[in-house]
Structures are given as C-alpha cells and as structure tokens.
Image (cartoon, rainbow, N blue to C red):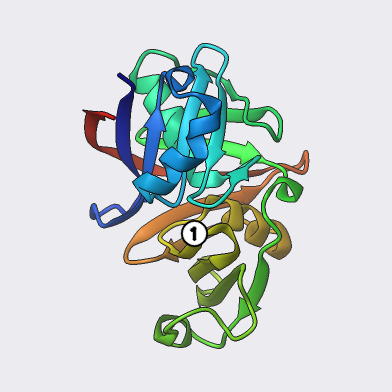
Amino acid sequence: MPKLHVLRVFVGEDGSGGNPLGVFPQGSEVPQADRQGVAASLGFSETVFVDDAAEGRLRIFTPGTELPFAGHPLVGTAWLLAREGYGVPVLRPPAGEVPVRSDGDLTFVSGWPAWAPPFEHVRLGSPAEVEALIGPPEGHDLAGVWAWEDEAEGRVRVRVFAVRLGIEEDEATGAHAVRLAAMLGRGIEIRQGVGSVILAEPKDDGFVEIGGRTEIVETRDY
C-alpha cells in the first residue's frame, strides 16, 4: 500500500501558512495511469510521485494536469528525502536537473524561469489592494498579483491565482517566485497566502534559487 506524506511548505517563522503538499516517496507503487486521478482525489495544489529516491527522479501533478517543474513540491520533496535518508544534491523532475541545498531549517532548490508556468505579473499599488482581492483580476487565469511591502528591504506581498492549472488560489507558489525574482532582478522575501514565506534570489548562472521552511503534517497509507 503506498505511503503518503502530507507536508506544509514555505511555512512562516511563526508556524503559520505553508502550502499543503502530498508526496509518495515510493511513487513507483502508484501506476502512472492512476496518478492524475490520485492527485485530483487528494485535492492538494500539487502531489509528487518519487520514482527513484536515490536519483531524485519524480513527477508532479496538480488536480488538473502534470507539471514539468514546480517550486513548493520540489522544496518539500527535497526536505522529505533528506529526512528519509536520501539527501540528494539534485532533483530530476521532467524539466531537468534541479540543484538542492539546505541551510539550517531552510531548504532551497534552483530552477530556470522558463521552466515555470507563464504567470502574468499584475502589480498593484499597495499590499492592502492585494489583500482586498476576492478572486483573480478580470481576464486572468494564471496570474501573480503583487505589491511592495518594503522595496528597500525586498519584501513583497503576493497572491497567486492559477485557475488554468486547476488551482483557484495557491497558498505559496515557488514557480511564481522564480519568475518574479527573475523579473525584478534581485533577491526578495515573499509573503503569500495566510502567512507563507518564500525566499527567492536570481543567481549569476541564470537560475533562480527559492527556499523556505517545511513541516510534516501526517503520514498515512493511501
């Protein structure tokens, strides 16, 4: 029987927020033909099936589609594999090789902005305007809405609406953080959802590194 680990990824320092994630560390026990249905039935914004833990090979599904790259699933899976004794330096989703590192209780992964879904960036004038939204801006089904909280310090308030991917609103979106940091060309600290925190920084090689804290919620048979 496959074992499901439920995590929260990009948890704030006070323990709030964090995007729920389902991970099957022995994902090969779930037939490939069943994976989209399993992801839909679980209802997390993403579910990960690890096909080879030692090699870091995995696949990522939203409730509606498969993704070649996604941020919070990769950060969470890297953290879980290290916890389970597979501290791999690289994860291998379909998009390509994703470098991994840890720093204390933070886990980081790096990816090319082009790997991330083509989020539109909608800038508003203040965090209050971002928080006042009751849904995605009109006409947008894959958008990150953002405003500076403190531009000098690089702090940003963000909400992400990914209706196109089957996610009405995401609690914390690493792939969007990759694109936003690349667009801004600087390191940023993102506050998203009800309390999630994502660190993102462009690197000299064109990658953008994202990271944050992960906690385990439960482990159960599926």
Query: What residue sits right under mark 1 in the picture?
Result: 189
In the rendered image, residue 65, in percent from the top left (x then y), is placed at 58, 48
In the rendered image, residue 195, in percent from the top left (x then y), is placed at 32, 63
Answer left or right for 45 relative to 98. left
Q: Which residue is painted at 37% across and 13% down in the image?
A: 85
Up the image or down, 73 lies above or below 94; here it is below
Q: Which residue is painted at 48% across and 45% down in the image?
A: 72
Name the one closer to the observer, 121 or 148.
121
Q: Which residue is painted at 30% across and 19% down in the image?
A: 1
Up the image or down, 216 lies above or below 163; here it is above
Q: Which residue is painted at 61% across and 50% down in the image?
A: 201
Up the image or down, 190 lies above or below 125; here it is above
Query: Type of residue at label 1?
Result: Glu
In the rendered image, residue 18, in percent from the top left (x then y), is placed at 34, 52
Picture quadrant where residue 17 is located: bottom left
Mark 1 residue element? strand
